[in-house]
Amino acid sequence: MLLDVCNVSKIYGPSCNRCLDLTGSEANRAICPVCNSIVAINSINLTAEHNEILGIVGESGSGKSTLLQLIYQDISASSGTIFFNGLQNDRGTPLNILDLPPSMVSRLKNKEMSMIYQNPRLGLNFLFSAGGNIAERIIGSGERRYEEIRKGSLDYIDRIEMDSSRIDDYPEEFSGGQQQRIQIAKALSSSPKLLLLDEPTTGLDVSVQAKILDLIKELQQEMGFSMIIVSHDLGVINHLTDITVVMKHGTLVEYGLTDQILEDPQHPYTQLLVSSIL
Amino acid sequence: MMNDLKLEVKNLAKTFTLHQRNGMEISGFSDVSFSVKKGALLALTGPSGAGKSSILKTIYRTYLASYGCIEFHRKNGLILDLVSSTESQILALRKQEMGFVTQFLKVLPRITALQTVAAPLLEVGETKHRAFSHAADLLELLGIREELFHVSPLTFSGGEQQRVNIARGVIAPKELLLLDEPTASLDEQSSDKVLNLLMGLKEKGIAMIGIFHDKQKIARVADSSFNVTGNACMNSAIVQKEAA
């Protein structure tokens, strides 16, 4: 198993001992009526195998992006454990990656996991060139030889089907779709085991969107990493994922094979979501 | 002989609950039991709306069963219940041992006919050259004109799409193949070619469950049949082979 998320919650606000019980899909709210805390993620359990592609769908505010940020540790969890890729201490006890020291967290984020954000400004350093951005990650994953770093950057520029003559251009000199491609190149340049994607194509026009999705799928088949994709677009989910998770008010309401979620949804909310496809 | 069994369906039932219609329940099918052996084809028959496609989708786990079990006899000798197994187990099975030729072709508009058919071979590690060459042979065998190979099959006629769909389903045949009306939109000649392909798969030991309407076709390719008639299903019967 690559990823094992156990009972993870994220609460914004003072929080009380009733927060988790009084919120969620059944309570039909994400704000605790006792202490007014926002329960963004409520006791989520989730697993992902190697080479598996998971999609997370749900309405705005359901906690999809928060869950991704918790796994990537952009934010800290209020409770729960996450085990990743058999990571354990010297005594062989599995390590909860939510409790890792900062040095280990950055090693994990530089090498084993990558995130592609909806907003390229979150994933790219706009003060560095395209090649510099990719090189930064290759260096972060441990490579120190200049020639290897440059070769790696050029290789990934080539993989995202971009002209290598643009390697020294800065992110702001690229279009939105090209910036997303550079983010993809940067994210994959450390050969991560898990790629997290937060609405990777939202805001791009459909032709660019299709090309980016094809690129992601092709690279996944070639490199064999696992992916978790957050999207509110069920077309994207249908195209890319094997398994779909449906979230509402911070809780997981349905988990199943993507074709099953789309053709035989069980939960009332999933049925509403699927029946809303244009 | 027990060892020859590929799939056993026992007391399978499916009910759809429509939450947007105040929890209204619609019965898809109930009390379905049959088995299929390696190298044999079971024909599902019955009127439209009786639940034939739903049975296939439940075996493939696109639909979740409401009751019963589906025992899949794996290559490694173990038996997996497709009703209670995990999503990851089903995904692995779909990649390696269970294929589904759906009634209608579903592909992206950017993918050519040749790429569509070659994809399953590439997935199992075949080289690009061999995969594309095999795909071209198969498309040619099924009567798709060469000039169409590099065009998206979504622009094809219904019958051509169905042949591309079948080619994709049989190019890297899995141990169990589910076929949803594989010859429905085909003329006699094309239909004949498809049936010959299915006969060839049987010789390779592939087990198949297919939905057919035409009695002659059933008599030609099926070893047994299961008649789905609304909620009450008839027992499996051995198909009378035509003497010829």
Image (cartoon, coloured by chain):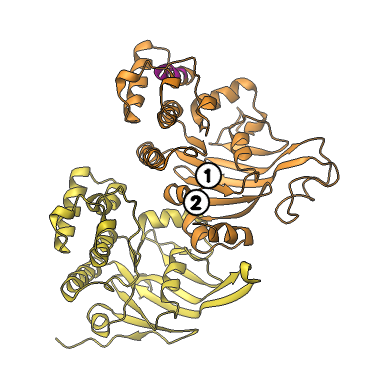
Q: Position of residue B97 (x, y in %)?
A: 36, 59
Q: In the rendered image of this protein, does residue B108 appear above or below residue B236?
A: above
Towards the viewer: A69 or B41: A69
Q: Quadrant of residue B155?
A: bottom left
Q: Residue at x 62, y 74 (%)?
A: B24
Q: Is residue B112 visible?
A: yes
**Secondary structure type for disc 1:** loop
Q: Tell me the amino acid under the disc marked 2.
A: Leu
Residue A275 location, x and y as percent?
Answer: 54, 61
Classify A75 as above or below A239. Answer: above
Membership of A137 in magenta stretch: no
* Chain A display color: orange
Which residue is located at x 27 percent, y 63 percent? B166
Q: Are marks 1 and 2 in contact (CB under 8 Å)?
A: yes
Q: Which chain is home to disc 1?
A: A
In terms of depth relative to the viewer, which is nearer, A200 or B190? A200
The outermost residue toward the top is A146
Q: Name the residue tied to disc 2.
A: A234
Image: magenta residue range? A130-136
Residue denoted by label 1: A231
Main secondary-structure element of the magenta-colored stretch: helix
Amino acid type indicated by mark 1: Ser
Q: Residue at x 39, y 18 (%)?
A: A131
Q: How many marks?
A: 2
